[in-house]
Amino acid sequence: MKTKKESSEVLYQLEKYKRIKLKDLDLLFVKSKKNKKKIIRLCTHDNKNSNLHEMFILHPKNYYVRPQMHPKKDESIILLNGKGIIFIFDNKGIIKEKLPLNKNNFFYKIPKKTYHCILILSKYITFYEVSLGPFKKENTIYAKWSPANDIKKIRNFQKKLLLSI
């Protein structure tokens, strides 16, 4: 598999006809361990301006996926391995739904304008995510009621989510 490195966390697949083998996912796992956050994303779309974004994403257990929403686009997630919970929130941060992400519940489509996050329960989680492009930072709105950079507040928030299961 040929890739272009945008950063230590983001790769773009270069082949004209995209395919992912199990050994490619293993390679992503190895590469993820080499960066600070231990995360990696393999994009199969050509660039940030592509109309359709398809990504293979790997996160470790304690990685914080901050609650967010996308005002103009839905997002689909297919679990490849690991376990987690997708939390759905109202605009004030009250949990509305807890969606198990596991071998029996492996696909979700999250509607636009829905605050959501993933709490990772296994050592690592790998999933395939699809959304409309182009990518623009302003199209991801982080919840004001969720912690941003304070690690202690983040861990407390994650603990609160875990205790709610």
Image: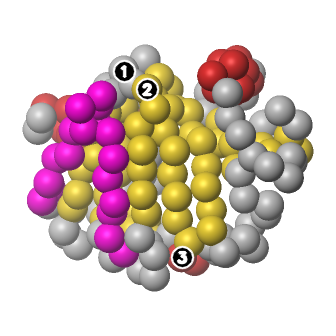
**x%, y% of residue 51?**
66, 75
Give the amino acid type for the residue marked by disc 3 in the picture: Asn
- 131 displayed left or right of 4: left
Query: Which numbered tag is attached to residue 80?
Result: none
Residue at image location 45% in from the left, 76% down from the top: 73
**Residue 71 lies in quadrant:** bottom left
Span colored in magenta = 95-112
Q: Is residue 63 above or below residue 97?
A: above
Alpha carbons under labels 3 and 2: distance apart: 28 Å
Per the picture, the main secondary structure of the magenta-coloured stretch is: strand
Residue at image location 47% in from the left, 23% down from the top: 124
Q: Which is more foreground, mark 2 or mark 1?
A: 2
* Lower position in the chain sequence, tag 2 or tag 1: 2
Residue at image location 52% in from the left, 58% down from the top: 130
> What is the crowding at mark 1: few (fewer than 14 residues within 10 Å), some, or many (at least 20)?
some
Query: Which numbered tag is attached to residue 81?
Result: 2
- The residue identified by callout 1 is 122
Marks 2 & 1, CB-CB < 8 Å contact: yes
